[in-house]
Image (cartoon, helix red, strand yellow):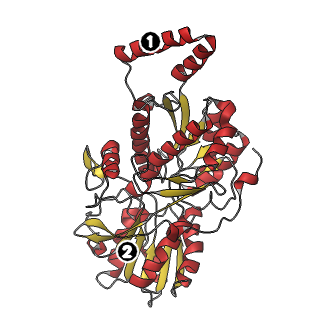
Amino acid sequence: MTDSSSIFGRKISRRNTLKGLGATAAGLAAGPGFVRYAQAQSSAPIKIGFQAHKTGIGASYGRWYEKTTNAAIKAINDAGGINGRPVEIIIEDDGTDPGRGAEIVAKFATQYGCDVAYGTLFSHVVIGSAPAAGEHKLPYFVVSEGHHVASTTLNRWVFQPGITDVKSEIQSMAPWIAANAGRKVTQIFPDFAFGYDHRDFLPPALKAQGADVVAQIAIPPTESSFTKYFPQIPSDTDVIYHVMVGPAVLTFVKELGEFYGSSKPQLFGFIDSLEAVDINSPGLEFLDGTHFWEGSPRYAQPDDTDAQKAYRAAVGIDDNGASVDDPKDVSTAAHMFGCWETLYVIKKAMEDAGYQGPADKAKLVEATEALTEFAEGPEHPQGPKVFNGKIHQVFGIQNISKVEDGKLKVVHKTSIEDGLYEPEGDYTTQPL
């Protein structure tokens, strides 16, 4: 299906039509070759297949990924599109399911004739969909955070250029956790690929800081009650490092508070445990004084740049990180910025490649691999970034925020250098 509300992101007016006719007349005067080029540029949209988690455990993310995508495409089209062509978003719901995800990627390539596929968040869906992107030679830009792309275990057609990965995030934050929260850490994480990244990368990162993971507790992401897991937490735990996903995240944090009462260990959470959840919900009072990782801060900060302010206005979130139309509709701010930034990476790579159509897909892959850094600004409001084309992964800053007075206040920012690591492989050696 095509979501008509998301197509082109601009209105057709008589003025625009007349401007288009004028451009065509100028092309006729320039000769037949120019006419073909002008028509291709003006009439054929760039098609981006948006693989959205409209339903399933990723639905809250999918809703805000779609809002952010529509806002970015509107901004891009209002500024002239990509290589002079408008951008069309074609949306399909993957149900946050890897099998359905693979079918949709194939559909984008064969049925819709998309130039790229884009948008996927949940790691098991990315891993399940990536082979289809390789098979159909369809550039696949994910906004997923997992280490699956950077590990170079997928294929050359898959990129993660708009959001950092868990390995980098953990490496960046481990020194702060060990120095400020505690040295005996119990992990609680979702029992699937994204959670396994936390399981695998936190222990060595903390060990390097003189701290230890004393227990690891995996919980199915579809679980609806969590109290039965909490007795597994060792009594000598200094810090509970938690990251939970899915529709029951509010239940998770509430039950954690009920289990401990006022005598809780230190808590350090990935904001995934609270994404799309109002931090002032009844039962979450115990979170006061605890800390969370955030990619992009949910709450407006005193030092927000003009670019960050403009981005927040464009995607429609207020100073509390909720929808300007509904204060109860809390955003997934820590992740959805990656949609905005990834779309601008696609734009940059297509312009560098001189992208004209499907025949240029290999050129687009190579142009993306040649990118090296993105300056903080309107296209990259979360902060500056460096890109490693060998592993198709971007690196950026991280935010550690403290819950104070019912809000999240950024208390520490890491540097890009804090999260850099040696590549585990090189996609550019693979044939296209």
- Tell me what residue is drawn at x 53 percent, y 65 percent: 166
**Quick one: 75 or 53, which is closer to the camera?**
75
State which mark lies toward you, 2 or 1. 1
- Tell me what residue is drawn at x 49 percent, y 71 percent: 172
Q: Is residue 31 left or right of residue 182?
A: right
> 10 Å neighbourhood of mark 2: few (<14), some, or many (≥20)?
many
Q: Is residue 273 left or right of residue 426?
A: left
* Type of amino acid under label 1: Gly
Instruction: List the residue tagged with mark 2.
Output: 256
**Quick one: 101 or 202, which is closer to the camera?**
202
Q: Position of residue 106 (x, y in %)?
A: 66, 38
Q: Position of residue 287 (x, y in %)?
A: 31, 73
Question: Is residue 228 in sight in this rendering?
Answer: no
Can you tell which quarter of the image residue 116 is in? Answer: top right
Q: Secondary structure at mark 1?
A: helix
* Type of amino acid under label 2: Leu
Can you tell which quarter of the image residue 107 is in? Answer: top right
Q: Position of residue 130 (x, y in %)?
A: 66, 49
What's the mark number on residue 22? 1
- Tell me what residue is drawn at x 58 percent, y 79 percent: 204
Q: Position of residue 233 (x, y in %)?
A: 47, 83
The C terminus - image quarter: top right
**Quick one: 54 or 15, which is closer to the camera?**
15
Question: Is residue 258 in sight in this rendering?
Answer: yes
Residue 68 vertical position relative to residue 296 in the rendered view, above or below = above
Residue 386 vertical position relative to residue 283 in the rendered view, above or below = above
What's the mark number on residue 74? none
